[in-house]
Amino acid sequence: HYDVVIVGGGHAGAQAAVSLRQRDFAGTIAIIGEESDPPYERPPLSKEYLALEKPFERILIRPRAFWSDRKIDLHLGQRVTHVDPTGHIVTLQNGTTVSYGSLIWATGGHPRRLTCAGQDLVGVHGVRTRADVDRMVKELDAVRRVVVIGGGYIGLEAAAVLTKLGKSVTVLEAQDRVLARVAGEPLSRFYEAEHRSHGVDIRLGATVECIEGRDGAACGVRLQSGEILPCEMVIVGIGIVPAVEPLLAAGADGGNGVNVDEFCQTTLADIFAIGDCAAHRNAFADGALIRLESVQNANDQATTVAKALTGVLEPYTAVPWFWSNQYDLKLQTIGLSTGHNQIVTRGDPATRAFSILYLRDSHVIALDCVNMVKDYVHGRSLVTTAAVVAAEKLADTTIPLKSLA
Ligand code: FAD
């Protein structure tokens, strides 16, 4: 028995345990995690870790000794397969049962897989875990050409790293621009041009028919147009499927993730959900029920639950923020741009240092900054207060954003 059982040892689960101890929670805590490594940072997997610029020990969320020092029991390499919400018991894949006082579900998601033929060939990779990237790196020496399926952040980051490593990279995006789900058109066009200038072949409106194989390994990607792109490696970055089956089977409300209230509580008593798998009503999305896939959201929801479990009921209202590194470009975003009806570009993208502001009915709702830390820091309050500012002023780089807040 543990007072708190945390399922999932990623960003959200680790932070929940850390925050509980920081708040002097004296009860027993266990993290049950499917991966065999102690909690580590996921963002470097498509950045410095893939580039072999950072060894694994440097992406650990805490030093290995931290967990036992703080009396946080790690049960690694264990998957929770069943939840009994009435008995307050979880069952692991190996049949072991563990009872809990409170359960924190922090399982993230598994990479969405292609549904076409060839998706399980050797050389086809998702990018979610250390093991995924280690497998890729092992194969890389024998790889000359890579096809990345999906022009989202993870696919583009991987494309940037692999290009730097000397691979010939093609990115296939089904929509008519990259980053279509998360960014405005000017940012998409900027990143498309950047990748092309580094030699990446960006194909828009490209639909995959299947992965071609030879002797069990991928040797090309066939498009619906009939064209075959020969390659030795395929990287699939088409999103995640939240890992919530046991909770839904136990009766929790949800569908695309598990639904939580403003305190990250699910519809089942004493069960919370946080991070990528938690569908919550977000104030920065006009109260829409959404999942956010970011370190910010994982950490802040973890803190919300740690507070709730130590007697402080504070709703989750944090402003979303995110970053992405590609080549020498550092993108920082704040707010959520969905639903914008005006875009203001601040500065000249050709200088490779500029910002984009998103407005909805004259209110600033989001900000994307490329190599523009100053705007990111100064523009934050424009987003958190949904400020109303004239577009000409936002576009004028001689006016600091902080003076407009
Ligand atoms: P995860 O970190 O995925 O952790 C969930 C853990 O639960 C996993 O270890 C999983 O194996 C385990 N698990 C799942 N099911 C079970 C089960 N039934 N039993 C036991 N354990 C289970 N975010 C940013 O803000 N900036 C970035 O630049 C950025 N880059 C990224 C790059 C990559 C390649 C990836 C994959 C993600 C990136 N993200 C980035 C997103 C960020 O990493 C996630 O939002 C964050 O990891 C979410 O934390 P989480 O704890 O919800 O899920």
Image (cartoon, rainbow, N blue to C red):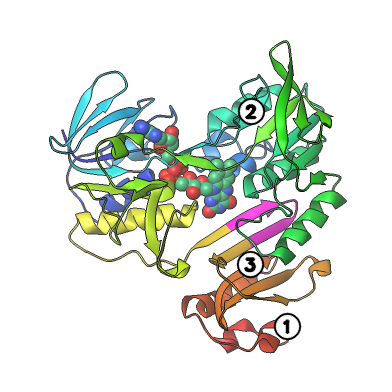
The numbered dot on residue 397 is 1
Of marks 2 and 3, which one's residue comes earlier in the chain? Answer: 2
**Mark 3 or mark 1: which comes first in sequence?**
3
The C terminus: image quadrant: bottom right
Mark 3 against mark 1, which lies toward the viewer? 3
Look at the numbered discs 2 and 3 and tell me whether their residues touch, using CB distance below 8 Å.
Answer: no
Few, some or many C-alpha atoms within 10 Å of disc 3 (few <14, some 14-19, many ≥20)? Answer: many
Callout 1: CB less than 8 Å from ligand 1: no
Q: Which residue is mark 2?
A: 116
Is mark 3 in CB contact (under 8 Å) with mark 1? no
- The amino acid marked with disc number 2 is Cys
**Which label lies toward us, 2 or 3?**
2
How far apart marks 1 and 2 lie (CA) works out to 48 Å
At 21% from the left edge and 54% from the top edge, which residue is drawn? 309
Residue beneath disc 3: 368
Residue labelled 3 has its Cβ within 8 Å of some atom of ligand 1: no
Picture coordinates of residue 246 (x, y %)?
31, 34
Upstream in sequence: badge 1 or badge 2: 2
